[in-house]
C-alpha cells in the first residue's frame, strides 16, 4: 500500500505462506530469515514493514504527504 500511496512503480510477488514458500531457497536468498514482507530495491533488501516504511519515506518522499496520513494530511509533526 505504501508503494501505491507514493505512486512508485513496483512488481508484486505473492508468497504463499501456507505452502512455506518463504522458506524456499530462492526466497531465502532474498531474506535469509524467511520473513514477509520484504522490499528489494536494486541490490538493497529491506525486511520488516516498519523498516520498509522508513526506507520509502527517507528515499522517496514527495515532501507534501506522509505515508501515515495519506492524501488528506500535510507532512507535519507536532510535539
Image: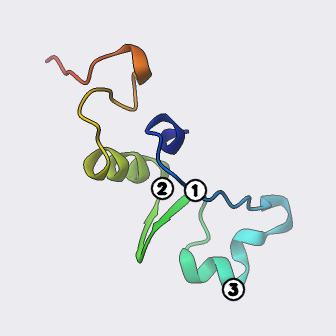
User: Where is residue 34 shown, x and y percent of the image?
Assistant: 62, 71
Would you say 4 lies left or right of 21 here? left
Separation of disc 3 and disc 2 at Cα? 19 Å
Residue closest to the eye, 71 or 34? 71
Eyeballing the image, is 15 above or below 2? below
Residue holding disc 1: 37
Identify the mark nearer the N-term, 3 or 2.
Answer: 3
Residue holding disc 3: 25
Identify the mark nearer the N-term, 1 or 3.
Answer: 3
| Disc 3 crowd, CA 10 A, few/some/many (<14, 14-19, 20+) | few
| Disc 2 crowd, CA 10 A, few/some/many (<14, 14-19, 20+) | few
Quarter in which the C terminus is drawn: top left
How many numbered markers are drawn? 3
Separation of disc 1 and disc 3 at Cα? 16 Å
Identify the mark nearer the N-term, 2 or 1.
Answer: 1
User: Where is residue 40 shown, x and y percent of the image?
Assistant: 49, 67
Separation of disc 2 and disc 1 at Cα? 6 Å
| Disc 1 crowd, CA 10 A, few/some/many (<14, 14-19, 20+) | some
SS at circle 3: helix
What residue is rendered at 26% in x and 49% in y? 58
Would you say 22 lies left or right of 32 here? right
User: Where is residue 23 shown, x and y percent of the image?
Assistant: 71, 76
What residue is rendered at 31% in x and 44% in y? 57
Image mark for residue 48: 2
What residue is rendered at 25% in x and 24% in y? 75
Amino acid at each position: 500500500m505504501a508503494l501505491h500511496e507514493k505512486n512508485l512503480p513496483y512488481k508484486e510477488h505473492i508468497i504463499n505462506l501456507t505452502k512455506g514458500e518463504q522458506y524456499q531457497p530462492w526466497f531465502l536468498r532474498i531474506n535469509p530469515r524467511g520473513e514477509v514482507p520484504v522490499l528489494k530495491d536494486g541490490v538493497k533488501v529491506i525486511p520488516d514493514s516498519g523498516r520498509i516504511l522508513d526506507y520509502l519515506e527517507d528515499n522517496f518522499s514527495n515532501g507534501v504527504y506522509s505515508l501515515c496520513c495519506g492524501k488528506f494530511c500535510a507532512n507535519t509533526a507536532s510535539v
